[in-house]
Structures are given as structure tokens and as C-alpha cells.
Image (cartoon, helix red, strand yellow):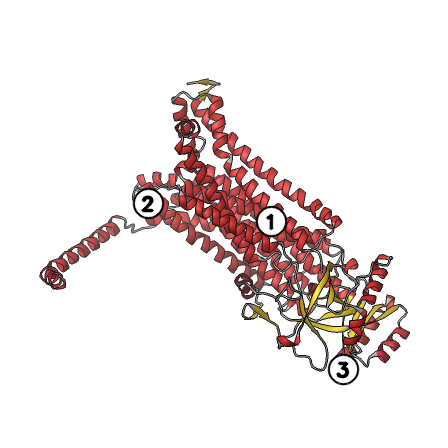
Amino acid sequence: MAEFVISQYAEQRDEILREARIRAERDRLEKDERKRRLYFPGRYSIYYYKMILKNVKYHIRNYVMLILSGTFLMIFLYLVFALWRAFQGVHTKEAVIGGEIQAIMLSAVWIGLLLNAVLMGFSFSYYIRNKMQEEKALVLLGIRSKSLTSIMMMEYVGCLMCSVVLGIGLGSLLFRFLISMLQKRFDFTFQWMPPSTYLLMLTIFLVAALVAAAVNGHVYEHMRWSAAGLLEPKKNRIPGLSGWIRGGLGAVLICVALLGLSKRSGGEDVGLQGWYLIGVYWLILCILSAQMKRLKADENRYYGQVFGNLTFLTRFRENLKKVYLLTLIAFFVMYTFSSIYIGIAAAPSGEEQYPYDYVCTSVMGEEEFFTELGRENEGEMYDYPMVTTFTSKPNKVSVLETIKGILTLRYTAVSNGREVLPVLPVQIGIPESVYIELKEKKYGEKPEALGLTGEEIAVVYQEDTSVKAHILDWLRPEEGIHLQTLNPDLELNGFEAYQAKKVQKEERDILTGVCSNGMWQNLIVFSDEYFQELFQGERMYLLNTGEAYDKVGDLLTEKAVEEETISFYGRKSSIQDMETERYLKQVIWLFMTVMTGICGIYLIFIKFCFEMDEIVERYRFLDCMGMHENTLKKTLRREMLPFFALPFIAGGGSAVIFSALTFKVRMYTGEEIMKYLCYALPVWLLYWLIQAAVYQVLKRVLLGKIIKYVFRKGKKL
């Protein structure tokens, strides 16, 4: 067989090569002829450019969405960089250079670019769709393809320039307004950004615009080929058994994700949220495919409901993707983005989170220094025994968290899926009697005794209600916490040195203060008898200094630098850093929420505007077939309803479930839940009111066009 094939190829080789040369020459001649025919030796007159400008004025509505999306991106970039520069003079230097402020800014830039790329993509696709009709007329008039491309490029560049000017202007006005509000809380003045920052903003803006143009360039070519009949229509395949299988897998993923998210060890985990959303997609696919299959199986039901379900019967996957995107947008608006803003708004003030001016911890031998400090200080000083405590393992690091760390320039060393820290977080171990005394100082009444034994502990998470929940030991957490205290035989890298302790009680409360967003200096409560076995002479000092705050701070700093035997943090600097981070997060994530909501409006608007002519022609046909006006309206309502109802049920319901899980893992009290809902409910209600308004407007526009073509003065033609 091989010999026969080789012999046939040898016999026909010359003929094959000759035909290939002929084809290549023919293609070259056709290309040269096309270039000769389209060659334009001169320059276009001024009337050519006047025609372009007049065409832009006539079709100005085609460019509004494109200009608005670019303006949103420029406003966002201006606010992020301007606020970052403003806070550099307020926030501590360590947190600005490679710290929390930089991480917030970089996270905002990347997520904002992604959202605006989607927004610009929707706008550009709408622009291309409307441009297709104009292009057909120009092609019939004999315009060159290069001229057509240049017209689109000039229009696109003009839209981008308008967006830059509007974005910088509106962004500067909004920034000055924010600065006027900030000056009441922080001590800084308004400063213009240097030219290098503007250049960086413009570079990022152009990159986003080029990405949107590149992605939609493929869409443009695809639409041209489809209009020319060069592409075969895609087959509409509604899943059968595979849909049920994926629906079952989706239900399993949802259950597993919710089970993991209901625990403090997995609460608010990004990876579990991703699995949940994949499960939601498969479940929606299963429900819709089963509904369509059931409809097609029953002739009576099919002929009665076919026109109301025509969008999924003819374009199942395309419309399924749009429904799922609207579901994701609803989930992001109601939970992912807004929960950050709402959590900060509902969180207690800084004064409530730092009940003492200074929180100091020291090893043995520093009693004389603090005794002298207390004698000179006019305020109060409380002295308690403590032990420095380490837990066995730091945070889990998922793939998504690793990517986020790279994008925010926070490079994290990882070993076996665990974060490798140069310095392990330090927790404070106290006896039960000290815990009761601290509680009594804060609430004014003595709490019930915990009744701990030597193998039992209680954990007090000293963290803000707006931050993600975390645990102290990622190794267990159902079995207990593995820990060891500061002692001569301390071995942080050996797991055998850690002892497992059963957690009798977990609570979130701030008894001394919040350190490093709650990652450090959480309280671990031991029984009084067991604490005496661990005690090595370490002390915790809680100081209220009054007017001597700065003086005491200088003394503590000098002592910490000279001997490195104490560590401390101050109330004023911690509150200022926390408030700057909070304010920056609030501005950024509120803007993110607004942009995501606009993406949802754009998507539902573009979906029905693209298909408006097709829908009108379809209902004209139904009118010719004898369908009454009220039936036409009901059918149109049934056709549009899934794009509002399914995202409302799936996306809105998921956001409510995740909010409830957040209350559980963050250990919210009833009062804190009500405060959170007071901020969340208006946001949720406003989003769905806007979505419902857009839905009603589009329905009325479609009905108006249908009635315009089908009816005349309320009577059928």
C-alpha cells in the first residue's frame, strides 16, 4: 500500500507542482489588479472630511456609548492615581511603599481595567453593529476598503480623545470634591499630579482601548463574513442527557462550595466562589435545556408557547451566555464588590477598635522601664501577664491568590499550598482571669467564667468586621489549634513542637486593639492553672496617655530601637492608617459597583438592540398570521422575561446566600447584621429598580416599533 501511494505521488508530482504555481500566479495577478483598481494617486479634498464629520453628527448616538465607556475608564484611573498620591502624605511610609495602599491601588487598577475592557467591548460591538448598515451603502457607492478602515479609525480615535478630555475634567472635579471632604478628617492639601502620572494613565488607557479594538476587530470581520454569506450558520443544539449530567455536577459543586464557605476556614474563599459560579452555570443550562426539550416533546404546548421561547429554541447557547453574564453581574453588584464598600460603611469607627492609646508587649526585665513610664504618665496604665503564642501554619494560598499577589507586587513564597512567611504572626496568650477583667473593663459587667481545663482554650479574634474572616491554624481547624508558646526550646519550623488544643469557644471582639488587620495579637485564653506552667515573665501593658501621647510614643520608640525588647503600636497612627485605607477602598469599590451595574445595563440594551429589526419582522409576520395585539404583547413579555427573572433569581439569590454566610463566618451580632442590611438593601433595591426600568423601557420601545409597523391608529392594517 505504501509503495503504491509513493509511486502515485512520484507520477503526479510535477502536475501537482504546476497547478500550485498556476494558482499562486493567479492569486498574485488578482491582488495586483485589485491594487491597480483601488489606487488613488491624489489626496482627498476637504469635502471628504466634511462628509465624515457630517456623518458623525447624523449618527451621534452610535458614538455616545463608546465615549461614555472610555470616560468611565479615564475617571476611574484619575481617581485611583490622584487618591494614591494624596494619601502618600497621610499614610505611614511603610504602608504606601509596597504596602496596603499600593496593594489596594494595584488591585483596583487591574479589576477596573477588566471591567472597562468589558464595558468598552460592549460599546464597540454596538458601534460596529450600527456601522455595518452604513458600510453597505458606502461599499455600493464604490469606497475603497482602506478608506473605510481609515474612517472607522478616525471615528474611534476621535471618541477616545473625547473620552480622555471628559474623563480628566470630570475626574478632577470629583477628586476636588472628595479632597474637600477629606480635609475635614485628614491633614493634607490638594496637589496636582506630575506629568509622569498623566503619561502613565494615558498609557494604561490606550492599552485598554487597543485590547478592546483588537477583540472587537475579530467581531467586525465575523459580522462582515456573516453578512456576505461566507460563514455557515451555527447549528442550534440544545443539550439532552449531557445537560442533566452537567446539572447534577453543578448541584454537587454548589453544595460543596456552600459547605466550605459556611466554615470560618473556608469563608469568603475565592476558589470556592468560583466553583459555586461554575455550578450555577451548569444548573441554569440544565433547567433551560430541560424546559426546551419538554416543550418540543409536547405538540400542544409547543405550538402554544413556541414564540415566547423562540430565543432559546433558535439560539440556545448564545442566549444562555447572556443570561449567565447578567447573573454574574447581579452577583458581583450585590455581593462581590458592594460587600466591600458596605462592610466598611457598616464597620465600627476607629475609636471603638482602639480602646487604648498604646498596646505594648515586653519580655521579662522591662518592669522598671514601664513603672517609670507609668509614674511620668498622667493617664492610666494596666499591666497583665501574657505569653507569646505561635500557631502551626499560616494562610492557605490558592492559585487565584497567587495571581493576585503577583499583580499587586506582593510576591508570596509558597510551599505545599501554604504561605511561607519570614516572620510568623504573633498571638497573645492570657489567663482566663485576665480575659474576664478585660471584658469587665469594656462592657462594665463581669462575664460568666469559661471553665477551661489544661487542654482547652478560647480564641478571641480581634479583627474589624469589614475584613475577611481568618483562622489561626489552617491545618486543622475542626480538631483544634496547634500552638506553642515562647520558651527556651522554641522550634517554629518543627511540627512536633506544636501542641493541639481543643477550642471551647470562639468569638470576635476587640479587647485590646486591632493589629495588622486582625492577623496579629489575637487573644488565646488558657486556664489560670495551665497559664502558670507556660508563663515566662512576659507582660502586656495597656496605656491611656491623655495629652502626653506624643511624649510616651517617643519614649517607647527609643526603647524599642535601642534594646528591641518591646513591641507596640499606637492608637492615633493606627486609626489614621485604617481610615485612609477604608476611604480609598470605599471610593474604589463603590466606583467598581457602579461600573459593573452599567455593564449589566449595556448588555441587556445591546442584546435587544441587536435583535430589534429581527423581532419587529417576526411580530409583523405573526400579525399577518392573525395574532391579536394583546397576544403579541404577552408573547413579547414572555420572550424578554428570562433575561430579567433568571438573573434576579440566580444572581440575587446567590448574593443573599453569600451575605448570610458572611454574617456567619465573620461572627456578626444581630445589631451588626441590621446595620449591614441598612446599607445593603438600598444598593440591592436601586440596582434591580434600574434593571426593571431598563427592561420596561426596552419593552415599550419594541412594542412601539411593532405597533408602528403593524398597526395604524389602533387598527390593524
Taking the spot 48% from the left edge, 58% from the top edge, the residue there is: 207
Q: Residue furthest left?
A: 11
Task: Residue 118 in the image: state x and y as whole percent.
Answer: 50, 50
Nearer the observer, 581 or 390: 390
Nearer mark to the viewer, of 1 and 3:
3
Q: Is residue 165 visible?
A: no
Query: For the residues marked 2 and 1, what is the alpha-carbon distance in whole angstroms?
Result: 37 Å
Residue annotated with mark 2? 225
Taking the spot 85% from the left edge, 61% from the top edge, the residue there is: 441
Q: Quadrant of residue 127?
A: top left
Instruction: Name the amino acid type tagged 1.
Output: Thr
Taking the spot 57% from the left edge, 47% from the top edge, the residue there is: 331
Circle 2 — which element? Answer: helix
Residue annotated with mark 3? 563
Query: Sequence-wise, which precedes: disc 2 or disc 1?
Result: 2
Q: Which image quadrant: the N terminus? A: bottom left
Nearer mark to the viewer, of 3 and 2:
3
* Label 2 Cα neighbours within 10 Å, binned few <14 / some 14-19 / many ≥20: few
Instruction: Name the amino acid type tagged 2.
Output: Trp
Nearer the observer, 374 or 86: 374
